[in-house]
Amino acid sequence: MKGAHHALCGAAAWVAVASTAPYTLGWYPVSSLGIVTGALVCAGAALAPDADHHDATIAHSLPPVSEWVCDLVGRLAGGHRNGTHSVLGIAVLTGIAWAAGTVTMHSDVLGDLAVGAGTMSLLLVAFAARALRLARRRLDAWALALALAGFITVAAPTEWDWLPVAVGLGAAVHVAGDMLTGGGVPLLWPWEPRPPRWWRRTPVLNDLWSSGGNFAFPVLGTTGSWRERLLVAPLTAYAAYGMGAAVVVGSLTALGHDPDVVMDQVWDAANVLVGTATVVGTIALTTPPPT
């Protein structure tokens, strides 16, 4: 998958898991603020497995720091689409996020500061900003990433215990996305089992488990294919819907309104409009034209 598509899938996955709005799963509910900021963090985490490639989008997201990080990760992971694209890689990234969340320091003015979570979010938000073209220039990426990382550093001790969930989810979404393309991923790295000879000679089966030890379900074809774009388009709309709903709910709460009551009224009105339009459309289609 292309970098921007990975990021959009990560944002959509976070909305599905963390939001409680209609048409979401709500498995790990967080506040409205957590949905919006978490979508950016998860989008960045959905790019993190490509930190094993010095020419990936994220390598140029926050130079020179991102370039140093990608060079180091590439050496540790054994090159592109190896360690970071495996179950072990997902676990390691999640563990790093959890460990980062435990690194705090105390300030007499601001209280406890989550410097670990802020530092990790600095890179992740920069990844997402460049991939989604929220920041086209290097200084813009630094400014956006520093602003949100600073906020996370101050707010994390009271609200950001979901950081490992967002990072793990984003990494898993990336690996799943690459599994849907022809190259596949080494899910069991560093163990890369080779299929038996009869498997390698059987059409379809040799696409699911390649001679190099990669596993795939290549329904999207090659990276950047029209099928990939077709998949990402509704996910983009879904991510925008979830973040928009979170902004509305957060604004209503700040204004002193009960967001549940207001949103129920909005959905009731929407259902009435849809029902009315359906009835009118049905009548219009079934009524014979005048002679």
Image (cartoon, helix red, strand yellow):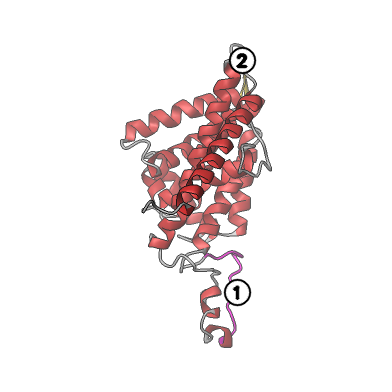
Whether residue 108 is situated above or below residue 72 in the rendered picture:
above
Asked whether, in this view, residue 221 is left or right of residue 173, the answer is left
Identify which amino acid the numbered label 2 is placed on.
Answer: Gly
Check disc 1 and report its element: helix, strand or loop: loop
* Left-right relation of 105 to 75: right
Residue 120, x across and y down, in percent: 53, 37
Which residue is label 2 attached to? 256
Q: Is residue 47 in view?
A: no
- Residue 140: give x, y in percent of width and height: 35, 31
Q: Is residue 163 left or right of residue 290?
A: right
Circle 2 SS class: loop
Q: Residue at x 62, y 43 (%)?
A: 24
Q: Residue at 61% across / 50% down in the picture?
A: 92
Residue lying at 43% horizontally and 38% vertically, measured from the top left: 126
Task: Name the residue nearer the viewer: 55 or 125.
Answer: 125
Main SS type for the magenta part?
loop
Measured in 3D between alpha carbons, the distance from the residue under mark 2 to the one under mark 1, in whole angstroms, is: 58 Å
Residue found 42% across the figure and 55% down from its top: 53
Residue extending farthest to the top is 109
Q: Give the x, y percent position of residue 230.
A: 43, 57
Magenta-tinted stretch: 185-197
Q: Is residue 155 magenta?
A: no
Which residue position is annotated with label 1?
A: 193
